[in-house]
Amino acid sequence: MRSAKTGTYHDEEILGKAYDARLMKRLMTYLKPYRGKVVLSIILLLIVTALQLAGPVLTQIAIDKYIAVGDMNGLLRLALLYGGILFSAFFISYLQFYIMQWIGQNVQYDIRMQIFKHLQRMHLQFFDKNPVGRLVTRVTNDVNVLNEMFSSGVVAIVGDLLAIAGIIIAMLYYSWELALITFLVLPFLVLATAVFRRKAREAYRDARAWIARINSFLQEHITGMAVVQLYSQENNTFKRFKDINSKLRRANFKSVYCYATFFPTVEIVETLAIALLIYYGGIRINIDILTFGELVAFIQLVERFFRPLRDLSEKYNILQASMASSERIFLLLDEKPQVSSPPQPKTIDSFKGGIEFDSVTFAYNEGETVLNDVSFKVEPGEKIAVVGSTGAGKTSLASLLLRFYDFQQGDIRFDGVSVRDMDPKYVRSFMALVLQEVFIFSGDFKTNIDLNNDAISDNQAAEAARQVGLADFIERHKNGYQTEVFERGATLSTGQKQLLSFARALAYDPKILILDEATSSVDTETEMMIQKALEKLMQNRTSIIIAHRLSTIEKADRILVMHKGRLREMGTHKELLEKRGIYHALYQTQFNYFQKTGTDD
């Protein structure tokens, strides 16, 4: 099976077979918790099928036994019986439909929970290579398609097949000659169905392809709306969207045309069969081989015979879509996380915060090394600054510490214990990361600080906000910490978002603090406001500071200088300047820049 990470938006075009036994067997495992209700649903379906077959039989009896001899009392009794059967069939059908819809909704819930749980376990490189839109489609659209199969697909197909089998038996019971006449028109129906399946398959594939394109276009251009408006590209963007939307409409029209052609064709074939029955049946009535009631009953059976055939053609598209969606979902679920917990994870008693990189080599993509044989130690409570030009591997160090990615060679140890021997969730539990680009969730200030962690009290969240200088801003709002915060912090300034991220880190009281250029987008006044909080926060905590501002770098206990994925220099600010090496060059470049612009101390 192909790896999900190699997919593109063309994955939306996956069709496969209309029925794939391998996929169906796997899908059926989701019905195991509800097998009792599935069995009940099938039993109810059998009862409904039997009740539906009773109609033609009662019609034949009414005509031949009561209407023909004028027995109105007997006809009334039979009519009441027929009404009772119809009412019973309605009630049982309602119950069967409700049960299957209930099963479908629960299976849909289970699959969504499984996918989301799986996504939370995946390594970050998986998300680097899989667009968000595609993953959202898996959890929403594809699961909805499977819901349709479970609620009105599989069991309904079983019901249709049972109905066809029962009707064929009844037709042969009444008259095998009339049954053969009915079957004479079936080759035309088989031919029409084959053409319909081929055309419907092509239409479905085209529609899926253009839906994928329109989803991709919308995601990209809504996210980048600021750029679209900045460069006045609204008209050009609208024209491109109109073109894609028109092609999607055209693809859907193909599907409409298939159904608009196929169903009348079935009606024509059915009408032809009934016409032949009326002609041949009339001849047999005249020679007293067949009664009028039997002919009417047989015609009703033929009408019931073609009804499930039409339904099966509709179910073909449901199966086609379900097989495609299930294949895409299973491709995602079969993707194994590169970073996972060992069978027997270790923990650290009295964790102090020591870090050791031992000959670590790492590449995001094979053959493209980002870190090469990096080794250093950080003592508990030490403040380490990591500097280097863009692409030197600074952020990769932080990502490996947090177990977002797995390294290829060497080892990383906390207090002497390898990160590979610990559960990644446990490793992250004693660390906090503050990024340059802060992600703010929709909700309120408090939930953005504690992230719905019940272990963090309201007072702790407020204290964290106070320490970073954000409390005054929050408390100026009428609802204080319950004030609504929009998605991505749309109403907050860059500085306010970064202060909120600092408060989040403080509230979790980490043993190790990682700052990834966390103050690079903050103005000097705001930076000064958080420096005191930072100094207090870093006390008795191991700190890794990835930064380029001189004020932050100079205060570090040691500075690591990264260059092209290698650790080239290490020492204090003074020691590195005296070496007049890479750090000296970086320092002079930034010092001259800040001297000219006046943007730093």
Image (spheres, rainbow, N blue to C red):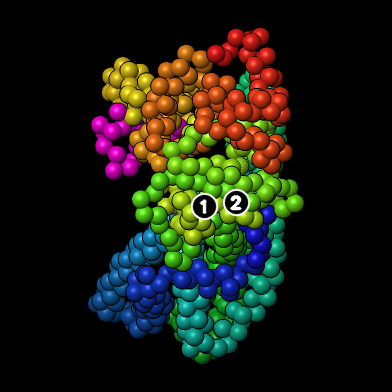
Q: Position of residue 175 (x, y in %)?
A: 52, 87
What is the count of numbered marks?
Answer: 2
Residue 413 within the magenta-colored segment of the rendering: no
- Quadrant position of the N terminus in the picture: bottom right
Relative to 279, say whether 346 is above or below. above
Picture residue at 54% right of the left edge, 48% below the top:
356
- Residue 239 in sight in this render: no
Picture residue at 47% right of the left edge, 37% below the top:
382
Amino acid type indicated by mark 2: Asp
Relative to 177, say whether 1 is above or below. above
487 lies left or right of 81: right
Q: Which of 78 and 364 is in front in this view?
A: 364
Q: Position of residue 410 (x, y in %)?
A: 62, 55
Picture residue at 32% right of the left edge, 69% below the top:
92
- Residue 418 in sight in this render: yes
Where does label 1 land, which residue? 413
Q: Are marks 1 and 2 in contact (CB under 8 Å)?
A: yes
The boundaries of the magenta stretch are 439-463
Relative to 376, say whether 581 is above or below. above
- Quadrant position of the C terminus in the picture: top right
Q: Position of residue 64 (x, y in %)?
A: 39, 82
Task: Using a 10 Å C-alpha cutoff, classify the residue at mark 2 as few (fewer than 14 neighbours), some (14 to 19) or many (20 or more).
Answer: some
The CA span between labels 1 and 2 is 8 Å
Relative to 497, say whether 379 is above or below. below
User: Which quadrant would residue 587 be assigned to in this image?
Assistant: top right
Residue 454 within the magenta-colored segment of the rendering: yes
Amino acid type indicated by mark 1: Arg
Where does label 2 land, which residue? 358
Task: Using a 10 Å C-alpha cutoff, classify the residue at mark 1 as few (fewer than 14 neighbours), some (14 to 19) or many (20 or more).
Answer: some
Q: Nearer the viewer, residue 270 or 385?
A: 385
